[in-house]
């Protein structure tokens, strides 16, 4: 049977059956999952440093051989299987958009939500599909009724778009924004929690903080801050742009009620996909940014009234989750940390290098920020690209100045060896 016919058959049953990636496993979509399974069965479960295994994973992507992309924190690529799935959904939708997108393809949404919910340790009734973290978090930031004089507490290192949202509330409604400064590197989590606690006042009505800071890759003590919020009756909004699918956790682990993330980062789902989580009993406390009909006050769907959007992208999220699960969440995290440890351990003792990321156990992942004495971050970033085609990002923030390096599971040790050579040359010349 042709792949196209198989796919149509699959679409026809979408309302009742889960989306099974094998349906898309045609000659055009070399499916990595059976190969991973076979590898583990034949050779024992592969570890974070088993290069034969990770070569299989690398082949599942379509990374350019012309640059070394170490800026996966910005946005990550999709595996071939996800690209192909989105392409097929898109081609089928184009055969009759109104019919296929709304009557057929969109019916797969519940399955996608179910899979996201499983990852988050939540119920599908607590999950809304969004386009990105910005949309998810702005739904939350603008979703609470506040009045002039109320305070929102956040950190000095939260993401600029979220700062814009807070600042707009400040300009428009007279809300006060208080920012807790985060030490760099963050060696003492408890100290940070104390800073948050000290900054809470009788007027604090909302707390916003990152789970993993984009500037340094530092993982913050979110659970402790959520507990603080609960103790004082203050909603805590967690910016999980970089944490979801980077390392495993559930919403209950974080004791979190409000969480937003981008699925096009560490999950490698299609560009323009994100997720909003709100604990069931809290849904009614938040207004959606895009108006919803009466009767949906307690339903998570009230956050999905976007109008026409990319249904093919949304549906292909399910395939990214299958790929993620096929590798295994724990093993993926171990590999991401291994990649950081690999390059950092080879340069960390050089005189003249500094790290803005703390390497405490469990406090970092694939994102690391470093600086070289005597060079600006922009100079280092420029030289890495000009001389080695290594693509990174220069961070010039009040509290963090350095180059951010973020490999992903398709990155090779050879890529990182080139980075190590480049750093050594910059330091020792
Ligand atoms: C911490 C953090 N929050 C939010 C965002 C916004 O993500 P998106 O552009 O996918 O909405 C980013 C993007 O890099 C980020 O790093």
Image (cartoon, rainbow, N blue to C red):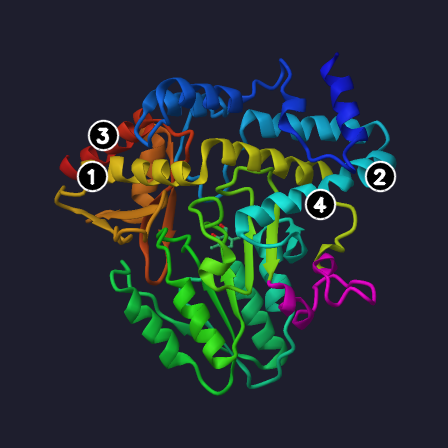
The image position of residue 372, as x and y in percent, is: 22, 46
At x 64% / y 16%, what residue is drawn? Answer: 26
Of marks 1 and 4, which one's residue comes earlier in the chain? 4
Would you name the residue on which mark 4 appears? 110
- Calculate the distance from the C-alpha at mark 3 to the C-alpha at mark 2: 54 Å
Q: How far apart are marks 1 and 4 (CA)?
A: 44 Å
Residue bearing the label numbered 1 = 345
Tell me the quadrant of the picture where the C terminus can be found.
top left
Between the residue at mark 1 and the residue at mark 2, the CA separation in whole angstroms equals: 53 Å
Q: Can residue 159 be seen in this view?
A: no
Ligand 1 is within 8 Å of the C-beta of the residue at disc 2: no
Between discs 2 and 4, the one toward the N terminus: 2
Q: Residues within 10 Å of mark 1 (few under 14, many from 20)?
A: few
Tell me if residue 422 is in the magenta stretch: no
The percent coordinates of residue 246 (x first, y second) are 44, 44
**Sooner in the amino-acid sequence: mark 3 or mark 2:** 2
Q: Which of the two marks, 3 or 1, is nearer to us in this view? A: 1
- How far separated are the C-alphas under marks 2 and 4? 13 Å
For label 2, the crowd category at 10 Å Cα-Cα, with few meaning under 14, some 14 to 19 and many 20 or more, is: some
Structural crowding at the residue carrying mark 4, measured as other residues with C-alpha within 10 Å and reported as few (<14), some (14–19) or many (≥20): some
The answer to which of marks 1 and 2 sits earlier in the sequence is 2
Dot 4: element: helix
259 shown above or below 308: below
The Cα atoms of the two marked residues, 4 and 3, are separated by 48 Å
Residue under pointer 2 = 103
Q: Which of marks 4 and 3 is in front?
A: 4
Q: Name the residue under label 3.
A: 421
């Amino acid at each position: 049977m042709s792949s196209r016919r198989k796919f149509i058959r699959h679409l026809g049953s979408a309302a009742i059956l889960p989306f099974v990636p094998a349906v898309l496993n045609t000659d055009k979509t070399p499916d990595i999952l059976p190969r991973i399974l076979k590898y583990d069965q034949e050779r024992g479960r592969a570890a974070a440093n088993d290069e034969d295994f990770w070569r299989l994973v690398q082949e599942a992507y379509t990374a350019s051989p012309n640059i070394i992309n170490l800026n996966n924190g910005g946005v990550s690529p999709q595996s071939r299987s996800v690209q192909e799935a989105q392409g097929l959904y898109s081609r089928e939708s184009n055969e009759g958009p109104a019919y296929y997108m709304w009557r057929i393809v969109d019916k797969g949404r519940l399955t996608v939500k179910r899979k996201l919910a499983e990852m988050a340790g939540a119920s599908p009734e607590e999950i809304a599909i969004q386009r990105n973290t910005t949309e998810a978090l702005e739904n939350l930031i603008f979703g609470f009724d506040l009045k002039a004089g109320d305070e929102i507490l956040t950190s000095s290192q939260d993401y600029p778009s979220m700062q814009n949202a807070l600042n707009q509330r400040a300009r428009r409604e007279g809300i006060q924004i208080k920012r807790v400064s985060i030490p760099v590197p963050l060696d003492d989590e408890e100290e940070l929690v104390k800073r948050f606690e000290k900054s809470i006042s009788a007027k604090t009505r909302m707390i916003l903080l990152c789970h993993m800071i984009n500037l340094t890759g530092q993982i913050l003590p979110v659970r402790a801050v959520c507990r603080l919020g609960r103790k004082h009756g203050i909603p805590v909004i967690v910016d999980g742009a970089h944490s979801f699918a980077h390392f495993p956790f559930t919403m209950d682990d974080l004791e979190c009620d409000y969480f937003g993330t981008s699925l096009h980062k560490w999950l490698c789902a299609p560009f323009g996909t994100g997720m909003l989580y709100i604990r069931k009993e809290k849904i009614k406390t938040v207004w959606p940014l895009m108006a919803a009909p009466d009767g949906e006050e307690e339903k998570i769907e009230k956050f999905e009234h976007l109008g026409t959007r990319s249904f093919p992208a949304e549906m292909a999220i399910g395939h990214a989750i299958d790929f993620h699960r096929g590798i295994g969440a724990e093993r993926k995290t171990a590999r991401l940390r291994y990649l950081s440890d690999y390059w950092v351990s080879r340069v960390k003792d050089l005189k003249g290098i500094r790290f803005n990321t703390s390497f405490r156990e469990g406090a970092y992942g694939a994102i690391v920020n470093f600086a070289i004495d005597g060079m600006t971050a922009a100079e280092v970033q420029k030289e890495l690209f000009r001389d080695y085609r290594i693509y990174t990002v220069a961070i010039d923030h009040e509290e963090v100045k350095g180059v951010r390096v973020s490999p992903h599971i398709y990155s090779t040790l050879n890529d990182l060896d080139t980075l190590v050579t480049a750093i050594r040359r910059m330091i020792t010349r």
